[in-house]
Image: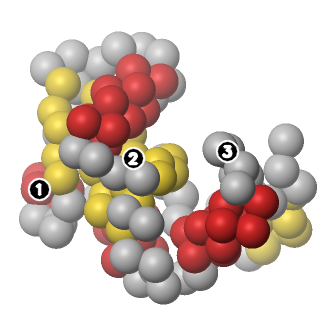
Amino acid sequence: MKTAVITPYFETEDARPQKCHDSVVAQTHPCTQIFVADGAPQDVVSRFDAQHIVFGANHGNYGDTPRAIGSVSAVSQGFDAIAWLDADNWYEPNHIESLIDLHRKQDAAVCTSSRMIYGRDSAPLGPRPPP
């Protein structure tokens, strides 16, 4: 299943998109990451093996427009599945594979998962169930 990961970003520290991208590259199910710069493209992202869409101005809606445009781009490229991951977050290595497995078992159009919440010191604070 051809999977895209849409990652909006705006004015974030270089280390955050790097950790985000590293987690997508490390997935046990192959993914293509599409970064969408919301008015503030960063050089670090242009060095990734990823697609990079750049907007000339910030839309001021917390990444909603970049998520939408990235998703439309993924659909037009023929991706079968779309996931979203903000640039200051990361996936565990089997995250996408677990969602693909869930989709195959349930034949659900939308699949969600729980999340792990971390403190500023990167210490885990505990899981949070899906909404």
Q: CA distance from mark 3 to mark 1?
A: 30 Å
* Labels 2 and 1: the sequence-earlier one: 2
Q: Residues within 10 Å of mark 2 (few under 14, many from 20)?
A: many
Pointer 1: what residue? Answer: 46
- Judge whether residue 95 can be spotted in this image: no
Q: Which mark is residue 6?
A: 2
Amino acid under label 2?
Ile
Q: Nearer the viewer, mark 3 or mark 1?
A: 3
Q: Residue at x 75, y 68 (%)?
A: 105
* Residue 17 image position (x, y, % from top left): 35, 59
* Residue 100 image position (x, y, % from top left): 60, 67
* Labels 3 and 1: the sequence-earlier one: 1
- Judge whether residue 58 can be spotted in this image: yes
Q: Is residue 63 above or below residue 126?
A: above
Secondary structure of the residue carrying tag 1 is helix
User: Which quadrant of the rendered structure holds the N terminus?
Assistant: bottom left
Q: Which mark is residue 90?
A: none
Question: Which is more toward the observer, 114 or 29?
Answer: 29
Q: CA distance from mark 3 to mark 2?
A: 15 Å
Question: Which is more toward the observer, 122 or 48?
Answer: 48
* Residue 50 image position (x, y, % from top left): 20, 61
Secondary structure of the residue carrying tag 2 is strand
Q: CA distance from mark 2 to mark 1?
A: 15 Å
Q: Residue at x 77, y 60 (%)?
A: 106
Q: Nearer the viewer, mark 3 or mark 2?
A: 3
Task: Place residue 33 in its image quadrant.
Answer: bottom left
* Residue 6 image position (x, y, % from top left): 39, 47
Pointer 3: what residue? Answer: 110
Residue contact between numbered discs 3 and 1, judged by CB atoms under 8 Å? no
Amino acid under label 3?
Val
50 to the left or right of 81: left
65 to the left or right of 62: left
